[in-house]
Image (cartoon, rainbow, N blue to C red):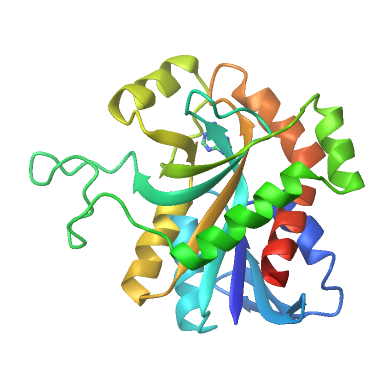
Amino acid sequence: MLAIVSAMPPELAALKALMPTDQITTVAGRRFHQGQLAGQDVVLALTGIGKVAAAATAAVLCQHFQASALLFTGVAGGLGAGVKVGDVVVADALLQHDLDVSPLFPRWVVPGAGKDRFAPDPHWSERLRQAAAAVLAQPEPELAQGLAAFGLHAPQCHQGLIISGDRFVSTTAESQALRAVLPDALAVEMEGAAVAQVCADFDRPFAVLRTVSDRADDHAHVDFERFLADVAAEMARDIVLKALRT
Ligand code: ADE
């Protein structure tokens, strides 16, 4: 069974609406919706915000639901120079930017894992990337309307490093500081690298796809709220459905 996971309700709402007669199980205070999407057995879940909430949910999905793979979809702040609001970023590596056990270990290294970057499953990442590129090239009417309402034109799909930490990055100073130490980071969010670490522990494939809701700058909180309301749900639905069908 494939797990499809987001942090917040608007990110998963449109996918969940496609599974009206699903079976709901509550574990650790979280509701897990089992059903079928595009002919595949899936379990949908909201992790809640932040690395701990995401890690707990990922562990339940791996252990209790025996998820065969985890796909994380949601929004992120854009960090890379060409990464604009409305663009999609598919992770090819994930790192916890707020993890620092130095000088005992090099900065960002997860003690025990012996590395700072976790690689997602190349197969699922490529399926998501191709689906995202197709959806962005020719958005369905509902998504096109949302993008237009936000004044977004011709969004692009990128692949690269996504960094996670327990902070909503909402000042230009902080995003500049992150860019200075991690110049190849394309986007920042609060869950992906935690899911990556748990999936590595359970030896389960995972992939992370994020739509850029804001530029992690002084306007981030305003852009983030609007983007969640206008675009996030339809973007996740259309890309995940296309990826499942390929
Ligand atoms: N998710 C979406 N935007 C974000 C930001 N600016 N910082 C952290 N997580 C985010």
Residue 209 makes an appearance in the image = yes
What's the residue at 84%, 68% (across, down)?
A: 18
Relative image position of residue 188 (x, y in whole percent): 48, 37
Relative image position of residue 159 (x, y in whole percent): 49, 45
Is 70 left, or right, of 225 in this rendering? left
What is the number of callouts on the image?
0
Residue 6 makes an appearance in the image = no
Is 3 left, or right, of 227 in this rendering? left
What's the residue at 78%, 57% (across, down)?
A: 13
Q: Quarter-wise, where is residue 99 in the image?
A: top left
What's the residue at 58%, 46% (across, down)?
A: 210
Q: Quadrant of the N terminus?
A: bottom right
Is 144 left, or right, of 125 in this rendering? right
Identify which residue, 76 or 47, lies in the foreground.
76
Relative image position of residue 224 (x, y in whole percent): 67, 32
Is 210 left, or right, of 159 in this rendering? right
| Figure check: 102 above or below 90 | above
